[in-house]
Image (cartoon, rainbow, N blue to C red):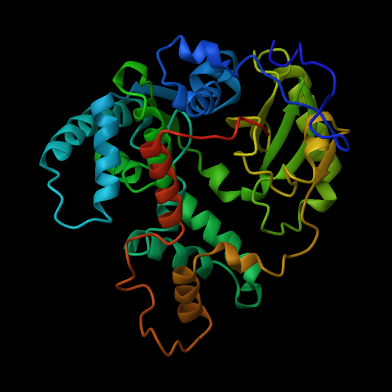
Amino acid sequence: MDGSSSPPLNYTSPRIQREVFRSHLLLSDQEILDLGIRPCDVELYRRRHYQASFSINTWYDALREHTFRTETVDLSFEEAQSIVTVFLSKRQAGVDLSKERDILQKLAVRLDWIIKNDFNRRCFIKLNTRSPKDAPIYDFNSQTVKKAIISEISRLEPQERDDNNETIAFVKATNRCLVTSSGIEAVQVLTRSMRIYEDLIKCIQFGEKHFEAKLVIREWLEEVINKPEMEFRCFVCKNQMNAITQYFSMCHFPDLAPRKEEIQKKILHFFDTQLKNKLTHNNYVVDLFIGRDRILIIELNPFHNGAGAGLFSWATDRDTLMNGPLEFKILLQPAHNVREHVPDQWQRLISSEFHNSEDEDDEDPDIDEPVAYWPWTLAAVMVVGSVITGRLTSRFEI
């Protein structure tokens, strides 16, 4: 079992006692070299393998009754390359995409049949690793996203339109834009997502021999979109739940505080009766949705600082996340900087539509914004740079 033979405390300095994280899912250098991976790529491959070990195909069969109805579709090396190329082309001029369009059109046809026949044209698509949830957030030219944001905030009464409630409405609106009704829409959202690009680059870089990726088509449940306050991230280490945080950690949900004890009991009961003995993983980060009469598993993530810690911190709460005792954090009052989680372009749109804000620089703030999504520039350079150099010097650690 994952982590069951972890050694006792190790020391990384004469002054600081620090427990070393162990997992059988972390391949040794020799195991990776035996696969034919170059020595300079060992650490990159170790991280990719660890992330892939939490893919939905590793746990879906054991827990299908507690998650969304799901179908998986194999993604070929050529299709993955095409998605990456189309993503990058949005930031480059004059790229010939005729080959990629032909490949992705065929992929869209395959997906469309499943979306039509198995999901009645309402589904959510993702990789077996991560989702394209960033795509609508940074698609500043999308009239669909613009209309969704305006529509969601319009539902608020004028006296409710503060930074916190508008940010919650923004979350609902951008999440609602992820609903997919056709193969073409599925391909479009995949090619607009930096998260999808990053994960495919990690798969492609080792060549076709070591490539493995799947597309995951999941049932669309409006209940989950309408109740973001009922999504929670839980940290499990050594098969013990040590921490729970509200998933949308930037927002204040007033209804959570009076229900905190009830929610914690429900989560722990679900963990003890449904998760604990059905997973081969002992260390993981699981996202749960607490519905009216059931709990749904949204996603299983690697126990690693690449998974956001919500109201915790991998830097300062590492011992709690690894060893407990159980702590459950919710936001008890609105954060002063909650609007920082809404990109500037959308903030200007919201101010223009609902607060009669006069922006001296933009008469219509959402028109002609650059397609090069602002948080992605540095990230893209870093990811591509690591691939080109083929080196990652720091060994895996949480």
The quarter of the rendered structure image containing the N terminus is: top right
Whole-percent x, y for residue 362 in the image: 38, 83
Above-or-below relation of 83 to 163: above
- The one of 132 and 388 positioned closer to us in this rendering: 388
Whole-percent x, y for residue 13 in the image: 82, 35
Residue drawn where x is 46% and y is 22% of the image = 39
Quadrant of the image occupied by residue 338: bottom right
- The one of 39 and 247 positioned closer to us in this rendering: 39
Horizontally, residue 383 falls left or right of residue 188, namely: right
The quarter of the rendered structure image containing the C terminus is: top right
Residue drawn where x is 60% and y is 19% of the image = 26
Horizontally, residue 105 falls left or right of residue 198, namely: left
Above-or-below relation of 253 to 353: above
Q: How many marks?
A: 0
Quadrant of the image occupied by residue 300: top right
Horizontally, residue 139 falls left or right of residue 3, namely: left
Above-or-below relation of 251 to 110: below
Residue 5 visible? The answer is: yes
Whole-percent x, y for residue 285 in the image: 66, 32
Whole-percent x, y for residue 189 in the image: 34, 45
Residue 178 visible? The answer is: no
Residue drawn where x is 84% and y is 40% of the image = 327
- The one of 329 and 150 positioned closer to us in this rendering: 329
Quadrant of the image occupied by residue 328: top right
- The one of 88 and 137 positioned closer to us in this rendering: 88
